[in-house]
């Protein structure tokens, strides 16, 4: 589908700088979110479905510690100067294991909700969610 990179304080920035955020949207069902800095072993989670569940293949993605990722991402949001967000609000958006149907029909909607939650502007090309399909 498409990717979005937040670095140097703006969308379209350099993903190699710290702090940074990369969101890759695939098939309207999966979005992988990578952020840095993050504690060791953390820095990646999914919205919509986890690839291991969507493709019914555990090799598609490593297990995700949802509580730890939510806490670390909330800390990341403070680092980039976004709003003070509680980890429990981030946690609600993360892809659960073995979910039958995520809350949002299209993962782009969940991506928008995550970005708004941390107070960042919506990147160009993401607005409209379902219109991207």
Image (cartoon, rainbow, N blue to C red):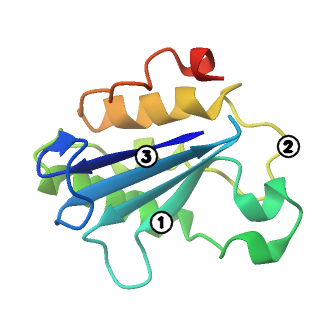
> Residue visible at 54% across and 63% down?
66
Identify the mark at residue 44; answer none if there is no mark: 1
From the image, tell me which residue sits under label 3: 90
Q: Look at the numbered disc 3 and give the secondary structure of its residue.
A: helix
Q: Which numbered disc, 3 or 1, marks the residue that appears first in the sequence?
A: 1
x and y percentages locating residue 13 in the rendered image: 20, 48
Task: Determine crowd level at label 2: few under 14, some 14-19, many 20+ residues with C-alpha closer than 10 A.
Answer: few
> Residue visible at 34% across and 57% down?
73
x and y percentages locating residue 18 in the rendered image: 17, 66
> Residue visible at 81% across and 53% down?
54
The span from disc 2 to disc 1 (Cα, nearest Å) is 21 Å
Q: Look at the numbered disc 1 and give the secondary structure of its residue.
A: strand
Q: Nearer the viewer, residue 112 or 132?
A: 132
Q: Which numbered disc, 2 or 1, marks the residue that appears first in the sequence?
A: 1
Q: Which numbered disc, 2 or 3, marks the residue that appears first in the sequence?
A: 3
Q: Residue furthest right?
A: 56
């Amino acid at each position: 589908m498409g990717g979005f990179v937040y670095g140097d304080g703006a969308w379209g920035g350099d993903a190699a700088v710290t702090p940074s955020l990369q969101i890759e949207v695939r098939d309207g069902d999966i979005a992988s979110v990578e952020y840095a800095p993050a504690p060791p072993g953390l820095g990646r989670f999914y919205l919509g479905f986890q690839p291991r569940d969507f493709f019914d293949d555990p090799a598609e993605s490593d297990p995700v510690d949802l509580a730890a990722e939510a806490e670390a991402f909330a800390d990341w949001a403070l680092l980039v100067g976004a709003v003070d967000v509680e980890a429990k609000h981030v946690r609600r958006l993360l892809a659960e294991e073995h979910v039958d149907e995520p809350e949002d029909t299209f993962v782009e909607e969940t991506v928008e909700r995550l970005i708004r939650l941390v107070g960042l502007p919506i990147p160009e090309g993401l607005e409209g969610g379902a219109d991207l399909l």
